[in-house]
Image (spheres, rainbow, N blue to C red):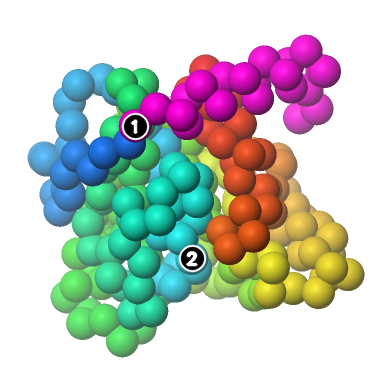
Amino acid sequence: MELTENESVAAAAYAEKLFCQPCVFVKGVVDVTGLPGDGVAEVAFAGRSNVGKSSLLNALIGRTSLARTSNTPGRTRELNYFLLGEALHIVDMPGYGYARAPKTLVRGWNQLLQDYLRGRVELKRVFLLIDSRHGIKENDRPTMTLMDKAAVSYQLVLTKIDKLKPSEVGPAIAAATEGIKKHGAAYPEVIATSAEKKTGIEELRRAVGRAIG
């Protein structure tokens, strides 16, 4: 969706104002009965285990350790709520697709994911993180299908593009864009990011601002 020059300037200004506010951890939610009921708008970040979600969230918020990073897949085991200023909840969702986790734990995470995505009025958009080196995988599809059925707006965010050769970035974006064409709830634009190099972070901030604006 192409923005006019004035819209782009306004979106950048709003994102800058939004993300210069303090961000604090609010709570971890293990069951939908514990979800905040204060009516604050929220955006959520989802993705396979070890996709680089915590690193990207830290880069997005401008902190180094707000969201815990780990080399151990499946560390995030609940919906972690962060409050940005007074305007926005940022939700770090449990990673999915980690086969070594106990099956009962996996079922619990999956159920939490499904319950959260159904009928959450405050949820304005899910940013679905995809490792740029691997693209959309089969274990991403159930989450995408679930969001399609629940009519939850979601946008693909490619991570770790610094691990690609420059010549590989364009094809990775093109492949991801092609992969969402048949998904009705998917936002048409794919954002390519690197938490390490800070590539695409401003674009992602603007996307967050547009989602709640």
Q: Amino acid at mark 2?
A: Gly
Residue drawn at point x = 74 percent, y = 22 percent: 8
Q: Position of residue 46 (x, y in %)?
A: 43, 54
Q: In the depicted view, which residue is nearer to us: 10 or 118?
A: 10
Is 200 covered by the magenta stretch?
Answer: no
Callout in the foreground (1, 2): 1
Residue drawn at point x = 48 percent, y = 36 percent: 125
In this view, which residue lies farthest toward the left? 33
Q: Relative to 83, is 74 above or below?
A: below
In the visual, does 113 lie left or right of 141? Answer: left
Is 10 covered by the magenta stretch?
Answer: yes
* Classed neighbour count for the residue bearing mark 1: other residues with Cα under 10 Å, few (<14), some (14–19), many (≥20): few
Residue drawn at point x = 53 percent, y = 33 percent: 208
Q: Main secondary structure of the magenta part?
A: helix
Q: Amino acid at mark 1?
A: Pro
The quadrant of the image that shows the N terminus is top right
Is residue 2 in view from this perspective? yes
Q: Position of residue 9 (x, y in %)?
A: 73, 19
Q: In the depicted view, which residue is nearer to us: 211 or 152?
A: 211
Residue identified by numbered label 1? 22
First along the sequence among labels 1 and 2: 1
Q: CA distance from mark 1 to mark 2?
A: 22 Å
* Classed neighbour count for the residue bearing mark 2: other residues with Cα under 10 Å, few (<14), some (14–19), many (≥20): many
Q: Relative to 14, is 187 above or below?
A: below
In the visual, does 55 lie left or right of 102? Answer: right
In the rendered structure, which segment of residues is drawn in magenta? Answer: 1-22
Q: In the depicted view, which residue is nearer to us: 37 or 162?
A: 162
Is residue 149 in view from this perspective? no
Using the image, tell me which numbered label, if any, was put on residue 149. Answer: none
Using the image, tell me which numbered label, if any, was put on residue 52. Answer: 2
